[in-house]
């Protein structure tokens, strides 16, 4: 059996495919997608507030409030996307660890000759 086969059997033995999927997919889904949605929604609110034509003082205040709320929502979305970038580093470290463990399994499997 080739070394690459033993390496892949190491992934199966450690069941690390499921771990990597859960560790990487969850932050991506929550932080990245939610962040992009909040960012787009916040920008849309700011755009709507700036294109609003106030007819009275009260409507001008509503536009200002809506614009500020849109900025806050857009800032929250930006923070979520930046948070995903920060979470990406440990995810990549975990991926490298799983490859290292599979490599160790392939060298420690029966039928391997010492180098």
Image: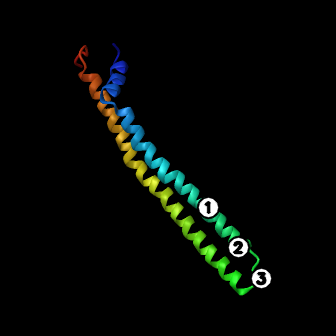
> Where 85 falls versus 97 (above or below)?
below
* Image position, residue 47 (x, y; %): 69, 68
Image position, residue 41 (x, y; %): 61, 61
- Whole-angstrom CA distance, mark 3 to mark 2, is 14 Å
The residue nearer to you, when weighing 96 against 42, is 42
Q: Is residue 29 left or right of residue 55?
A: left
Q: CA distance from mark 2 to mark 1?
A: 14 Å
Percent of width and height locating residue 31: 48, 53
Which scheme is used to colour this image of the protein? rainbow
Q: Quick one: SS at disc 2?
A: helix
- 59 or 83, which lies in front? 59
Q: Is residue 88 left or right of residue 61?
A: left
Within-10-Å neighbours for mark 2: few <14, some 14–19, many 20+? some
Q: Residue at x 33, y 20 (%)?
A: 6
Which mark lies nearer to you, 1 or 3?
A: 3
The answer to whether marks 1 and 3 mark residues whose Cβ atoms lie closer than 8 Å is: no
Marks 1/3: CA–CA distance: 25 Å
Location of the C terminus (image quadrant): top left
Mark 1 or mark 3, earlier in chain:
1
Q: Residues within 10 Å of mark 1 (few under 14, many from 20)?
A: some
Q: Is residue 31 left or right of residue 9?
A: right
| Residue 50 badge | 2
Q: Residue at x 46, y 53 (%)?
A: 84
Residue positioned most to the bottom:
57
Q: Quadrant of residue 21?
A: top left
Q: Which residue is mark 3?
A: 55
Residue position for label 1: 41
Whether residue 102 sits left or right of residue 57 in the image: it is: left
Q: Determine whether the residue tagged by mark 1 lies in a helix, strand or loop.
A: helix
């Amino acid at each position: 059996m080739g070394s690459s086969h033993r390496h892949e059997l190491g992934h199966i033995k450690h069941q690390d495919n499921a771990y990597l999927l859960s560790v990487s997919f969850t932050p991506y889904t929550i932080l990245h997608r939610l962040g992009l949605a909040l960012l787009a929604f916040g920008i849309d609110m700011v755009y709507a507030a700036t294109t609003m034509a106030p007819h009275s003082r009260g409507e001008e205040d509503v536009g200002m409030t809506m614009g500020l709320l849109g900025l806050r929502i857009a800032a929250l979305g930006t923070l979520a996307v930046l948070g995903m970038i920060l979470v990406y580093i440990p995810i990549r470290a975990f991926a490298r660890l799983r490859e290292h463990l599979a490599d160790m399994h392939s060298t420690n499997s029966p039928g391997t000759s010492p180098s």
